[in-house]
Amino acid sequence: MKGNKLFIVLICLLTLVWLSASVELVILFACHDFCTAGELFAFLIPNKYEANDISTYILRFELPYLFLLTCCLVGVGVGIWYLTRKLTPPRVFFAVLITGALLAPFIIPNQPCCLLREVIVVSRQILKVKRNKDNAKDFLYPISKSQNIEETKEVYIFSLGESLRYHNLSLNGEYKRDTNPLLKKQRNLYLFSDYYANATLTQYALPIIFTGVKGEKYETHFNRKTLAYPFKEVGFYTALISNEEQLLNNGLHDYLTQDFDTLIWVENDSLIAPKAQELVKQKHKLFIVTHFLGNHFLYRNCPEGYRKWLPDYNLTPRASSDSLFINAYDNTVLYVDALLNKFITDLDEEDMICSLLFISDHGERIMKHFGVHGHTYHPTKEEYHVPLMVWYSDEYKDAYPQKVENVIKHKGKPVCADHVFWSVLDMAGIAINGGLMNEMSIFSDALAPHERTLLLPDGKSVIKLDK
Ligand SMILES: [Zn+2]
């Protein structure tokens, strides 16, 4: 009787390990690498967009692998049953030994395919956010505004893109497809050529950018207020306008939105510029953060009229072409070009000091049958080489000629997401006393060399990007 119970426990344990092994193998076959904590995050804190896209993707591309693995599982199960059907101790021992040896790589924590370790990592991360989200309550920034231009209207925008990589912008002068037909005509718009993200997942990139901590000190961000706070302190009205399917609306990261005067969630990216324009008409001193859904996998965020490169995965998913995904991606880049251009054109029509800093949170790795970010502990450059763009109105140039000169001077320099917090404040002439404004702002004359690092999907390890 005792032997029977032990046998059942053993079979249950083996089944669990088999299940995690099958998840790892399916992801390995379909996406060329094992599952990471960052990916599990998308399942544990799901939003409508990711859940929908991931399930669509799994059904279409991973189903054949799942079928094969199920056949293997059934085969192994029958084998175990055959060996142990009389439950003689040597047979049970023999079956467990073989299965254990086969599955060992999936249960040893230092192996890249150990799913359990990634589950523990992501659970800890979520718990940490829940425990620490109120830490910054009493934090204070010693702030000053460098110029007193109270009578003039001032609007500053920090705009966040999603999964947009530098390589696919024709604005870079090298990409052959004309993905930026509108932005390339904008005056006063500069694209930085050597800007790197600090993480390959939104849930790590945003907290760092919003609070100005360095990537390797990700967890210290809980102790700091976000960049909306200094703006508020010097009299600005602060607003966040975000696609409702983006990270800050997931219920877990709401602590990053607490410093804003107003939060506006919109159903799609095309509503962001009009909502911003409404605020621009009402407020004299305004700071807006916008968060687009942009170029997120499966590249569905693109109206019909922008589907220029065909076949596009979202129109003809079963078409026989190696370019299905890159075409779909580039079509979303074309759409983002139109969105940003409209945003800037509307702002330019107003008579005010205004500037906009745009970055993408991370890039994207696009292959024949999928696109992905944050999927690996060995990210490729396309996952972190992303655009940083600065646009300013003529009135801004008149008010801050030195800052404009500095931005143009620095646009080829190596910079990264660690610079964003300081640059957004400095763009508006706001200084944090004792802060890193001088050395870390792209608007500063004294921008200093800085070691660029990338936070990996465990939210802890970093790699150096300038070797
Ligand atoms: Zn993202």
Image (tube, rainbow, N blue to C red):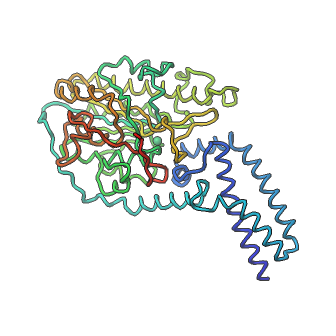
**Spot occupied by residue 323 in the image (x, y as percentages of width and height):** 62, 26
The residue furthest front is 467
Residue at x-position 29% and y-position 50%: 259
| Left or right: where 59 falls relative to 458 | right
Residue at x-position 42% and y-position 27%: 339
Q: How many marks?
A: 0
Image: 181 above or below 291:
above
Image: 449 above or below 307:
below
**Spot occupied by residue 167 in the image (x, y as percentages of width and height):** 47, 28
Q: Quadrant of residue 357?
A: top left
Quadrant location of the C terminus in the rendered image: top left
Foreground pick, 89 / 326: 89
Foreground pick, 187 / 323: 323
| Left or right: where 192 falls relative to 425 | right
Q: Quadrant of residue 466?
A: top left
Quadrant location of the N terminus in the rendered image: bottom right
The residue furthest bottom is 1
Foreground pick, 130 / 100: 100
Residue at x-position 34% and y-position 49%: 214
| Left or right: where 88 falls relative to 304 | right
**Spot occupied by residue 391 in the image (x, y as percentages of width and height):** 30, 27
**Spot occupied by residue 193 in the image (x, y as percentages of width and height):** 38, 28
